[in-house]
Amino acid sequence: ACKMNESSSLSLAPPGESMAEVHAGNRERLVAALRAHLSAAGRPLRGIVLLKGGEEQTRYCTDHVPLFRQESYFAYLFGVREPGFYGAVDIGSGQSILFAPRFSPDDAIWNGKPKKLPYFKDMYKVDSVFYVDELAQVLRCECSEHGHGEPLLFLLYGQNTDSGNYSRPASFEGMDKFDTDLSTLHPILTECRVTKSDMELALIQHANDVSSEAHVEVMRKIKPGMTENQLESTFRCHASMPRFRSKFQDFPWLPRISVPLVASFGNQNLDPCTKAAGVAPTHAYVPLDRTVPFFIMDKMMGR
């Protein structure tokens, strides 16, 4: 059994803010930055930011669904954990809207009873929630109600300089009736993500504190002959302790492990660091079934 160590000098209590507050603050900063940019360019302060969340994928031709990870920009603004959503922010009013997929009753066999729209409104603290198939109609009404005139959508399109890949702009049925802007949003939203708010810094610090203690726990438990997947199991167990997420009941899956174990590649010199390419984006994952030599334990424990 995995037991937690109560004697830690780190401050491991989760921050008091809810995740919904963090994402609401992110939306406010984006709206302010867009308004400043449009004003400086002499453009009217109108339009709607529209982002598409991640879609659930299957593994090749099978019906197996890998662990879903939300699209990063969409997660930054809305914090939605489910796939298939769209999100909109009105630049003029600051109002936020989520669009949820409409589930078939058959989905309940595997996923349980489908959540109603009020659940998502309360969960993610947005101003309104509709279904995805209502998207075009709702956006036209939003533009009309706030005097925007011809609907203008700011879509996310730009290159990730690390991967070289491009963000895919949102698309939906009836989008040809809207004017679109593909150049404004990406650099501004990216810059917003670079500068962290106090709430984001508190969450990052908390994640680092939890990760640090989990690494110490791995070093404490490691023994000769253990396999790397056993060490990863110890890390995941310790990082998932209830005391680390007690104040995140609105988002009970936090904290989440972001990457698999980075460990020795088993090279001739038995250096546990020089061949840790298992999680690099340009390398294949390596198996985690190698055993841990005794000297690594000595090195990790400082002997």
Image: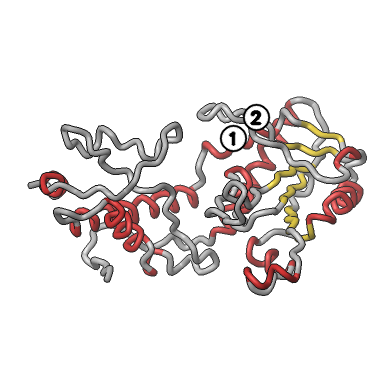
Which residue is located at x 86 percent, y 53 percent? 138
Return the disc, 1 or 2, that comes first in the chain's sequence. 2
Return the residue found at the far front.
61
Q: Residue at x 24, y 68 (%)?
A: 6
**Rendered residue at 83%/55% (across/down):** 133
Front position among marks 1 and 2: 2
Query: What residue do we see at 69% from left, 32% from top?
Result: 157
Spot occupied by residue 99 in the image (x, y as percentages of width and height)? 75, 56
Image side of residue 205 versus residue 24, left or right: left
Q: What residue does disc 2 label?
A: 158
Quarter containing the N terminus: bottom left
Please say if the residues under marks 1 and 2 sit with CB atoms less than 8 Å apart: yes
- List the residue tagged with mark 1: 190
Q: Is residue 117 left or right of residue 164?
A: right
Where, by quadrant of the figure, is residue 42 drawn? Answer: top right
The residue closer to the viewer here, 277 or 242, is 277
Examine the image and state in which quarter residue 171 appears: top right
Circle 2 SS class: loop
Three-letter amino acid code of the residue under disc 1: Thr
Label 1 neighbour load within 10 Å: few <14, some 14-19, many 20+? some
Q: Secondary structure at mark 1?
A: helix
Dot 2 amino acid type? Gly
Looking at the picture, tell me which residue is in the foreground, 103 or 28: 103
Percent position of residue 166, x then y: 63, 31
Name the one closer to the observer, 283 or 213: 283
Mark 1 and mark 2: Cα distance apart in space: 10 Å
Counting labels gives 2
Q: Percent x, y for residue 103? A: 74, 64
